[in-house]
Image (tube, rainbow, N blue to C red):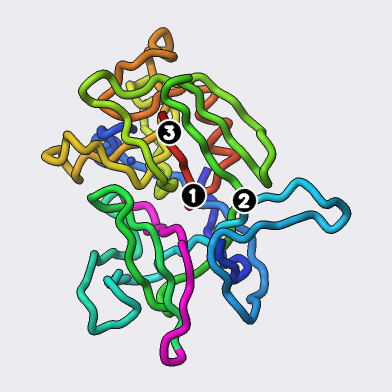
Amino acid sequence: MARRLQTREWLVAAAGVALVALALLGGYAAVRARAQGATPRLPLAPVRVTPAASPSPTWERWTVLRALGPVTAYRRPDTGAGVVARFGAVNANGFPSIFLVHSVRQVRGSTWYRVWLPVRPNGTQGWVREGRVSLYTTSAKIVIDLSERRLRVYRRGQLVGDFPVAVGRPGLETPTGFFYVNQKLRPPDPGGPYGVVALGISAFQPKLAHWPQGGPVAIHGTNQPELIGKAVSHGCVRMYNRDVKKVDRLVPAGSPVVIQE
């Protein structure tokens, strides 16, 4: 289901912690985006869009960066500032390096993007300079309610999917906060514990930093559907295979993920 990532308009708006196992097993699904022309100014993300024919509803549109080569994230919009992290064009799992944009700043003739980064600690941000990145936008968003054990998908502000999930067990609770889908992985065995697809997110299980790749969290399928609706994982969010396939189709890589109690 690989699809090419392309540049879209210039506007702003990882399987549980076991993603590493997926990386060893292989494969990824590519990001989705449509190309569109650039605009002269870059406002803070997200942009709220209102349909011209109606005063409501409004929705958020977010800008996403995809690395085209090595990318360095700095503490400030200055190459002389401290380095937060360095990334290749693809990550450790072979998926394109993706960053969700928080805001944009023009500094001495260069455009800098303040982005969320898929690194520890959760919520880390850094500044990436224009050049080795392409841009596209997304109006999709995932909201996960841990107490209800539900995952909801929104597109253009409208609810388009509402699904039951399993979440982290006591002591290894699914982390809460603001994240984004930073990779999509397809397990070679759809009947395995990660199901048919895994949507890696930029969150990490705080209590499993010693795990490979730092213990990334993901939304993924399962081979134990009887556990959906329970708190049983190491921090990942499990879904019925049929449901996670729908979420994969609805939500492009780079889309925000809000996890709340």
Q: Residues within 10 Å of mark 3 (few under 14, many from 20)?
A: some
**Spot occupied by residue 210 in the image (x, y as percentages of width and height):** 11, 39
**Spot occupied by residue 182 in the image (x, y as percentages of width and height):** 40, 49
CA gap between label 3 and label 1 equals 20 Å
The first of marks 2 and 3 along the sequence is 2
5 vs 227, nearest the viewer: 227
CA gap between label 2 and label 3 equals 20 Å
Q: Is residue 158 left or right of residue 18?
A: right
Q: Residue flagged by tag 2: what amino acid is it?
A: Ser
**Residues at marks 1 and 2 touching, judged by CB atoms closer than 8 Å:** no
The first of marks 1 and 2 along the sequence is 2
Q: Is residue 189 magenta?
A: no
According to the picture, the residue beneath numbered tag 2 turns out to be 139
Helix, strand or loop: magenta stretch: strand
According to the picture, the residue beneath numbered tag 1 turns out to be 253
Dot 1: element: loop
The first of marks 3 and 1 along the sequence is 1
Region in magenta:
94-109
Q: Residue flagged by tag 3: what amino acid is it?
A: Gln
**Residues at marks 2 and 3 touching, judged by CB atoms closer than 8 Å:** no
125 vs 223, nearest the viewer: 125
According to the picture, the residue beneath numbered tag 3 turns out to be 260
